[in-house]
Amino acid sequence: MDTVIDVSGLVKRFGRSTALDGLDLRVPAGEVHGFLGPNGSGKSTTIRVLLGLLRADGGAVSLFGRDPWRDAAELHRRLAYVPGDVDLWPNLSGGEIIDLLGRLRGGLDESRRADLVERFELDPTKKARTYSKGNRQKVALVAALAADVELLILDEPTSGLDPLMEAVFTDCVDELKDAGRSVLLSSHILAEVERLCDTVSIIRAGRTVESGTLADLRHLTRTSITAELAATPTGLERLEGVHDLAVQGVRATFEVDTVHLGDALAALGGFGVRSLTSRPPTLEELFLRHYSAEDPA
Amino acid sequence: MTGTLTLLRFHLRRDRLMLTWWVLGGVLLYYSQAVSTDSLYATQAELDRAARGIKSNVAFIAMAGPARALDTIGGQVAWQAAAFGAVVAGLMSMFLVVRHTRAEEENGRDELVRAAVVGRYAPVAAAALVVVVANVLLGSLVAASLLSYGLPGAGSWALGLAAALAGLVFGAVALVAVQVAEGSRAAVGMTCAAIAVAYLLRAVGDTGDGALSWLSPIGWGQSMRPYADESWRPALLSVAAVVVLAAVAVRLLDRRDLGSGLWATRPGPGRGRLGSSWGLAWRLQRGSVVGWLVGLLLGGLAFGSIGDDVGDLVGDSSFSQDVFAQGGGSIVDSFYATLAVMLGLLAAGFTISSVLRLRGEESDHFAELLLSTGLSRRRWAVSHLAVAVIGTVAVVAAGALGLGLGFALVTGDVGTAATFAAAASAYVVPALVLGGVTTLAWSLRSAWARAGWVLLVFGLVVLLFGATLQLPGWLMDLSPFNALALVPAESFSPGPWIGQAVLVAVLGIAGIAALERRDID
Ligand SMILES: Nc1ncnc2c1ncn2[C@@H]1O[C@H](COP(=O)(O)OP(=O)(O)OP(=O)(O)O)[C@@H](O)[C@H]1O
Ligand SMILES: [Mg+2]
């Protein structure tokens, strides 16, 4: 089994509005895959389709090579899910819920359970009604991470966690990666994605706009250049891939598509470079560019 | 208090439909008593006879209240409606209070509201004002409708005022309960218990020397003696109770944290024994099963203890013949045949609410988490439906047992009591039909889930007014309760009963098939 999640051309409509409009997503086995997109772009909807909770209106969806709508319960024994908003039965204690979900998944690893409860500093005797948002999330995380499964589907799992707990979560995902498990991680926290994910998919308005390794994606973006030259530069605006050019006397600042960086540097060389600073694109810029509606990738 | 009026306007907008139904239902409760008394007793002599019958029957007094001016239409209306009207007003106020306080805190909307420019007391003040508006509307419309029917002015206003004040007192009780209780469900339970205790206190008081009735907000309203030489002073007791309870609620509000009650939630076990959807369904529903069981048992006892002294109560008018002598036979048999249907309809209330637990689990997003495990939709639904079915059997049995026991204790006639109990037991099947309809409606589309309640109200209308309104037979038979023979007034015919049992199975299977085809929220 080399592909765990394989979605192509997925369409999902709610009444007259189209939430997913030809979305593609592929997660190879053993990979931690980041799933990114602005609010309302369809991440949670995609995940619900993958879980067989929603029925696809079009496209092909396969989970472990099978149809998640038809074989939902059977496939679910091989995965664990943490929803974006964790709601729990107010009258049950955290420990009861962890054990219930574990048993319904076909058993959980006792020593891992104990270990996780301790690392996440969770009090399992509290009733769910008294848990904070972060603690409810921990209950779902412990239940999911303690399950002996091949795939974890995590929808913004750290949105309620404090930085300390986020670090614990990061360690847990590292351990999963070492154990060869696959993870689909939807997140708005870019540092987390950068730290954990091998590959990412970026979606917008129900469509995949970019997918690949972070290095691949960086390559598609721009580098900022500030140069002090011996002479006033001319003709830079005609170079391919140069944007936002500003020339003040002998000083030029601009952004250049990373693929055309070499040409731009060569052109600058012709005016005698006194000093040069170049800044590679930050992840923020990368995402902002993909997220913003005016500038389709 | 900043923002109170804005919130009030917002609440009233959101509640306008629900409020309309509550108030209309309440007004109808009073108004229909006037109409039915008029049509039940054709002559004053009959009314006098009924009044004597009621006065001499302790069970009647316990059920409705002290016998005053029962030889007048007004007196009859006050006697029949005051206690139940107070309960309805109390339930309405309770739902409003819980909905706008703890329920809002639990779903997190309260935080949003508080983040806006809103004073600390604004949410609670707005909730209280909604209750005031609702009860003022209820009370004045009750009075106006009775006046328009032609009943005396002072009595009509006293009766309306009694209803509104009872609503306000129980609203204030709910306001205290939401400060104290663990969560909104617990607050509902506490307030319902308070209403039940108030009802029982006056039941015991009214049948004895009346002292205990003075401890009950329902008793205060009845002490205003509508249509029987009104006395306005007891109203002050209600007002005082409202003021004291509201003050207590505000004090408690200052002492508790938002989102949690005054009593800290006791910790639960760190390890769980729950391991299946069956266990979970039972765990989630057991409280309500036990509550309905006790309720139906008591209801059955109350009905049964009317005994065989029903001839005077049921007059000779055409309306009373329509309702209580359906199917012919002796008047006692007909009367109990009708009460058996009533118990069945009550039990169907449990069935529907139990099935709707599935909808609650879905809309609270618990289903999403559950169905992401190895649990299939079918097994999830079947486990809750199993609780609904077994619970319905138990609840109907409790009602039938109560009915038989009550009758046997009062009359000593065990044989007849057993017949009545058996008649009531048969209604487990139509109750399940309503549950089946609820299942299918919810499975097709979760927004349709309330269809079962509509059918329940329809069944009640058919039972009480079907003959009077001369509804066509096919229409009345759309209520599964009407489609069965009225045992023991008529003899039991197994055909329709078995047909309905098959229908239950079909509805259940179709429901689960539909559920497997739709999106889960
Ligand atoms: N049950 C539903 N009915 C109607 N519309 C829905 C439903 N569920 C989702 N949508 C719509 O589908 C779109 C995608 O929503 P989704 O929750 O998948 O976004 P998301 O990417 O998870 O956003 P976020 O980052 O805020 O969690 C939104 O426009 C949302 O309004
Ligand atoms: Mg989401």
Image (cartoon, coloured by chain):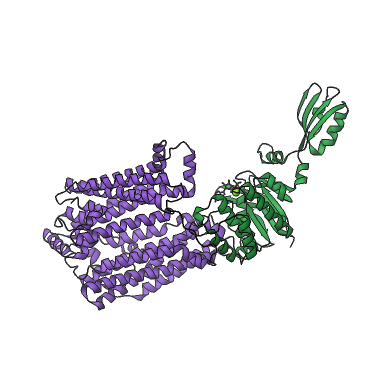
Chain colours: A green, B purple
Place residue A246 in its image quadrant: top right
Horizontally, residue B491 falls left or right of residue A207, namely left
Who is closer to the viewer here, B36 or A117? Answer: A117
Relative image position of residue B37 (x, y in whole percent): 19, 57
Relative image position of residue A297 (x, y in whole percent): 71, 41
The single residue placed furthest to the bottom in the displayed view is B415
Measured along the vertical axis of the image, is residue B405 above or below residue B91? below
The single residue placed furthest to the top in the displayed view is A249
Where the N terminus of chain B falls, by quadrant? top left
Who is closer to the viewer here, B476 or B1? Answer: B1
Relative image position of residue B145 (x, y in whole percent): 24, 47
Horizontally, residue B302 falls left or right of residue A71, namely left
Relative image position of residue A2 (x, y in whole percent): 75, 60
The single residue placed furthest to the left in the displayed view is B45
Measured along the vertical axis of the image, is residue B64 above or below residue A23? below
- Answer whether residue B109 is visible to the viewer in this image: yes
Horizontally, residue B373 falls left or right of residue B266, namely right
Place residue B309 in its image quadrant: bottom left
- Answer whether residue A14 is visible to the viewer in this image: no
Who is closer to the viewer here, B333 or B83? Answer: B83
Measured along the vertical axis of the image, is residue B384 above or below residue B259? below
